[in-house]
Image: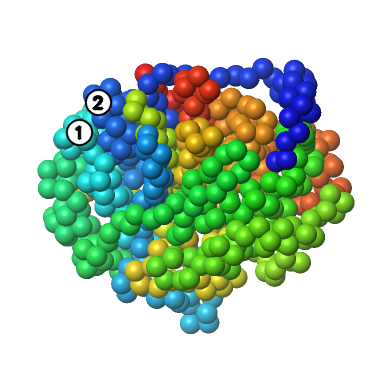
Amino acid sequence: MKRNLVFSLTFLLIISSCTNKPVEEGLTAKNGMVVSAREEASKIGIEILKKGGNAFDAMIATDLALAVSHQSAGNIGGGGFMVYRKANGETGALDYREKAPLSASKDMYLDKQGNVIKGLSLAGAMAIGVPGTIAGIFEVYEKFGSLPIETIFQPAIDLANKGVVVTTKQSAKIKSHLKYFKLVNKEEILFQEEINAGDTLRFPNLANTLDRVMKKGKDEFYKGETARKLVDFIKDNNGIISLKDLELYEAVWRDPVEFEYDNLKVISMSPPSSGGVCLEQIMKMIEPYDINDLAHNSLDYIKILVEAERRSFADRSYYLGDPDFVSIPKEQLVGKEYLLERMSNFSFDSPTPSNEISYGNVEILESDETTHYSIVDQFGNAIAVTTTLNGSYGSQLYCSELGFFLNNEMDDFSSKPGSPNMFGLIGGSANKIEPQKRMLSSMTPTIVEKENKLFMTLGSPGGSRIITSVLQTILNVHEFNMSMNRAVNSARFHHQWMPDIIKIEQNSFNSKLIQELKLFGYNIDYKDPIGIVDGILVKPNGILEAGADKRGDDTAVGF
Ligand code: DON
């Protein structure tokens, strides 16, 4: 954004008086705030803060509470990323992404003719990556934890024993997955019966697993009784994860991606997530344009974002992968000259077809579930965490004895060059399967500073749509002066290079605009939802404002 202050202020006044309805604020709080996919989890996080715990203690408690109350995505059988900014301005990132097992291989999802075997990376034990969540939680605790581990774990254990009341959205999701649960699991699982909104689900086996991990530590999950039971279960379902795989798993501290945009500093997740790099590319590609002179979600605004997004996703598919395995030309990819050159054929007069940027044709198969939560504590520390099983309920494989679902994160690898994964993303050799490698992610937990102070913490589920959802939310606040609540709940659109389609949320854009986009030459398709963003904004007076996305059951709790 190149801001002409007088013009901008006048324009903002016009915008807020006619286009944007009055700013609707989300929940506000003075001391601390947790925004997550479930009220139970946000409440548990806040209780930890009220006991004097910090954002990192609350992160662990909230994560575990989501593993109990939001089992389609919250997990101990998956992995995730955390970005943090401490009150003193120190920043960092934790990678507890799943890894390919030791006996994984490049062609493990291909048949003899070299074709992708449908579903093998998506459902059942072959789809599972070595889980990272418990390692991540203990890494956070060792570095930053301040309360006794029992104080942090016990609320989630109690919740699992007491039970969780099923919401309408959860019951619909469970119903839509029953046929897959039946196909994949040998025996009846807890989720086999039809479950209705208002029913209480109890998880005693998950409570026992969490209790053992609380008492014996991380090794219980990676080397102890839980590890042995998990490996036996996976073997029994024809999977390849071994005890050695679990023993070798470690979470890794990484340097986050950090860059400036106007007077903001954006701190986001580095590879093996593509989130931070793509966010930096897109924001730097659009920065030369006067974004705040355009109306929100107007034709020209959509053109600029879409064209930057397609260029960035084309780079993603070629260059990005696990930095422990491939060398990523990061500085080049986000270089000013490079990005100017990348946008040099952008024009407001006609779209740039994706196949002129690179080649490839894809069809998509979609399903989705991941979860993001944001926390700011009473000391001024902030965290952004996105965690996932990949698809809703991951591989659909539920280990009844231990009480949790296992991820299908292996689908985030590129099974075959040019062949799309469940988000329609295509990848190349940088993201090919190799033993012990982490699969490329789009998860974009992000913290934003303004003039050296904490400004926002946010993130989203939604696969490839995560990056564009986080992008639009930051722009909504920064360029269009929205409250956090309004910013997360505004309509979104998405382009990911291939397929060459703009996805828009149904009933959110007027038919005239859609017609104009089509006339301009864009292919339009509908997708609901595009991201479920949770975030916290620090207002100029220091008050925290929550944005809990109405697209989910997301809830903010503050104090
Ligand atoms: O890491 C990734 O990019 C995907 N496994 C995330 C999956 C996801 O967001 C599904 N959600 N809605």
Q: Residue at x 73, y 30 (%)?
A: 5
Front residue of this view, candidates 492 and 207: 492
Q: Amino acid at mark 1?
A: Leu
Q: Does 236 sit left or right of 253 as displayed?
A: left
Q: Residue at x 51, y 39 (%)?
A: 448
Q: Amino acid at mark 2?
A: Gly
Q: Residue at x 65, y 51 (%)?
A: 284
According to the picture, the residue beneath numbered tag 1 turns out to be 147
Displayed quadrant of residue 6:
top right
Indicate the position of residue 440 as horizontal and vertical percent values. Answer: 47, 61
Q: Does 398 sit left or right of 334 as displayed?
A: left
Q: Is residue 475 above or below residue 316?
A: above
What kind of element bears circle 1?
loop
Mark 1 beta carbon near ligand 1 (under 8 Å): no
Is residue 498 visible in the rendered image? The answer is: no
Q: Quadrant of the N terminus?
A: top right
Displayed quadrant of residue 419:
bottom right
According to the picture, the residue beneath numbered tag 2 turns out to be 52
Indicate the position of residue 43 as horizontal and vertical percent values. Answer: 34, 25
Is residue 527 visible in the rendered image? The answer is: yes
What kind of element bears circle 2?
loop
Displayed quadrant of residue 497:
bottom right
Q: Is residue 529 above or below residue 94?
A: above
Indicate the position of residue 101 as horizontal and vertical percent values. Answer: 32, 68
* Mark 1 → mark 2, Cα distance in angstroms: 8 Å
Q: Quadrant of the C terminus?
A: top left
Q: Are marks 1 and 2 in contact (CB under 8 Å)?
A: yes
Q: Is residue 410 above or below residue 36?
A: below
